[in-house]
Amino acid sequence: MAKKGEKKSFLMHVVAGGGAGATESLICHPLDTIKTRMQLSQSVGRPLSPFATASRIVAREGVRSLYKGLVPVVCGIIPKMSIRFSSFEFYKEIQADAAGNVSTSATFVAGLAAGVTEAVMVVTPVEVVKIRLQAQTSSMSDPSDWSRRKYKGMWHAAYCIVKEEGPSALYKGVIPTVLRQASNQAANFTAYQEIKKRMISYQGVEELQPWQHLMIGGFSGAMGPLCNSPLDVIKTRLQKQTIVKGQKPKYDGVTGAISTMFREEGIRAFYKGLSPRLMRIVPGQAITFMTYEAISKQLYEYPAFRVGVDVAAGELK
């Protein structure tokens, strides 16, 4: 049994974060594919709704096409969530006062730093590969059409990108990705931690029920997308385009993408895919936080996942 006053270990945050990320991606990936297709659409008129976009994908490419890019997402989200939760706890802990208390502003900074960390270490290269796979319109229900697709899978896509465009191509859109992830996690963690703390205080309990973690996680998850949708669209456009030597790319960096998109498509272009992004992130974050809390609770019963515990003896050092 856990002893009073013991802290959760770094390893516990890594394992619980990875498990939560894997669960979330397996459930919510189709919504991410729909969001990506909507963001890549360069139509000037009224864009297709998320449901119309999904129907078109299924009709033309088959149901399984909604899971295009799933492998790099799963391979990326496990380390991403592990890094997100463990780095957040690390940044939060180094800002705590002598009594171990962490202010709201410190929580915000910890979330900001965690977002930057995951964006640089995992998110950017994984999303470049994922978006290239999702952007392919080859039908999975037509073997001849499917065999002609450029990228055959995650590793083949990464190989082709590096071979044709250089290793730096895997970091296309790194600036908007860093800004997006930093703002996402700053808003996400701050909202979650503050609401959770106030609910625990109001109810006079030591911990909340799983459904309450689900609700708080969903609400906090909506904060980031509502604030940074333009950054996400710009990032997607930059990561999707292929660089050909000797040719000037359509979107020449962040500022170039902003001016080109505004000139050709108008201000609404920066909010393409917001609905499916919210549909993807809100339930995704709800599932992530509920799963993270559930896994953490189970792991906390084992000495190896508590700080200051002698693993062999199961006693405090």
Image (tube, grey):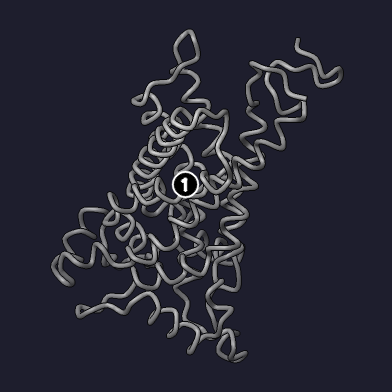
- Say whether residue 59 is left or right of residue 228: right
Residue 81 location, quadrant = top right
Residue 111 location, quadrant = top left
**Which residue position is annotated with label 1?**
217
Q: Is residue 247 above or below residue 173?
A: below
Name which residue lies at 55% across and 49% down.
211
In depth, the one of 106 and 270 nearer the eye is: 106
Name which residue lies at 81% across and 21% down.
311
- Residue 264 in the image, given as x and y percentages of width and height: 16, 72
- Say whether residue 302 is left or right of residue 20: right
- Say whether residue 63 is left or right of residue 40: right
Name which residue lies at 62% across and 90% down.
143
Q: Is residue 115 above or below residue 242?
A: above
Query: Which amino acid type corresponds to the residue marked 1 in the rendered image?
Result: Gly
Name which residue lies at 61% across and 34% down.
13
Secondary structure under badge 1? helix
- Residue 103 in the image, given as x and y percentages of width and height: 38, 21
Label 1 neighbour load within 10 Å: few <14, some 14-19, many 20+: many
Q: Is residue 91 above or below residue 222?
A: above
In depth, the one of 280 and 156 nearer the eye is: 280
Count up the numbered dots: 1
- Residue 96 in the image, given as x and y percentages of width and height: 46, 16
